């Protein structure tokens, strides 16, 4: 295990995604986030008092040759920061993984711990900020500091990547410069985020905007399970994945 990395460094093409994930977990480049993630891991939430919190940066999750990438915002304090896996152990993840399961891109509808056996089929899930931020709000500076990790991840996924679902406006703002830095041509002026927005990057993947799976959006009905499934299906098809239609068919659960 590589620990105590001072900060992001761009990883070369010859280094694998597993090595990148390992290096991310040792990053300490953002003092405010390091303090917060470790403080939360020490103090815990009463319901998880018997857990040993992860308390470190949370790397991306899913196969290294994924044609579809899902890009969120940042791990939740008592979700990813507790379990060590993206969107695992919180309400947002419950919504996301249930939808991925429904469209045939995940092996099970729930995500409770890093060793629960969940498998993603052709999908990788990551975020532009890898540490849990206070109030779920990273600063623009923290977002920019973490961008090198995302750029490295995009470069490593590039040979197979065909579609990206970006959850929420923050992820969109973070993603566009990262895609440009990773070598794709991003249109100018930069496309504006919206649910259902689709942007084709010249020679690269198609980007799909989707409201974030946050409780604020799902509890209020701004993002319904059906809306989420629709975006995942469209993006999955653009990525060449066999997705399940609303009425069934082409199911690939194994
Ligand atoms: S947010 Fe990113 S750059 Fe900042 S400490 Fe965490 S992993 Fe490192």
Image: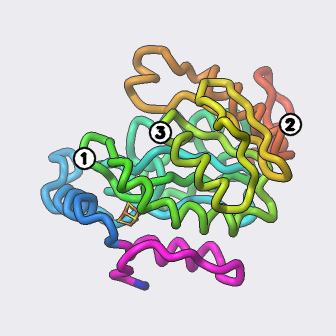
Vertical position of residue 207 compared to residue 193: above or below: below
Reading the image, the residue beneath label 2 is: 250
> CB of residue at label 3: within 8 Å of ligand 1?
no
Residue drawn at point x = 86 percent, y = 36 percent: 250
Residue drawn at point x = 13 percent, y = 56 percent: 43
- Front residue of 49/239: it is 239
Vertical position of residue 234 compared to residue 79: above or below: above
- Front residue of 246/63: it is 63
Q: Position of residue 4 (x, y in %)?
A: 33, 81
Q: Is residue 55 magenta?
A: no
Q: Residue furthest top?
A: 221
Give the colour scheme shown.
rainbow
Vertical position of residue 204 compared to residue 172: above or below: below
| Circle 2 or circle 3, nearest the eye | 3
Please report whichever mark, 1 or 2, sits nearer to the chain's N-terminal start.
1
Determine crowd level at label 1: few under 14, some 14-19, many 20+ residues with C-alpha closer than 10 A: some
Reading the image, the residue beneath label 1 is: 134
Q: Residue furthest front?
A: 189
Q: Is residue 26 magenta?
A: yes
Would residue 120 be seen by someone viewing this image from the given angle? yes
């Amino acid at each position: 295990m590589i620990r105590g990395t001072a900060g992001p460094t761009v990883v070369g093409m010859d280094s694998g995604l597993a090595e990148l994930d390992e290096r991310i977990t040792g990053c300490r480049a953002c003092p405010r986030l390091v303090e917060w993630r470790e403080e939360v891991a020490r103090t815990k939430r009463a319901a998880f008092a018997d857990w040993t919190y992860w308390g470190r940066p949370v790397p991306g999750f899913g196969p290294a040759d994924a044609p579809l990438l899902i890009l969120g915002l940042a791990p939740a304090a008592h979700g990813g920061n507790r379990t060590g896996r993206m969107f695992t152990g919180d309400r947002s993840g419950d919504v996301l993984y249930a939808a991925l399961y429904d469209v045939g891109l995940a092996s099970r509808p729930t995500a409770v711990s890093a060793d629960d056996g969940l498998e993603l089929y052709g999908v990788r899930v990551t975020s532009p900020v890898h540490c849990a931020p206070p109030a779920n709000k990273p600063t623009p500076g923290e977002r920019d500091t973490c961008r090198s990790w995302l750029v490295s991840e995009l470069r490593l996924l590039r040979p197979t990547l065909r579609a990206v679902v970006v959850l929420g406006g923050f992820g969109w703002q973070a993603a566009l410069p990262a895609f440009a830095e990773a070598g794709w041509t991003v249109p100018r002026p930069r496309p504006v985020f919206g649910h259902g927005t689709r942007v084709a990057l010249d020679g690269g993947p198609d980007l799909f905007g989707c409201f974030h799976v946050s409780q604020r959006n799902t509890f209020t009905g701004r993002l319904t399970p059906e809306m989420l499934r629709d975006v995942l299906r469209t993006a999955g098809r653009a990525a060449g994945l066999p997705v399940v239609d609303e009425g069934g068919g082409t199911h690939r659960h194994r």
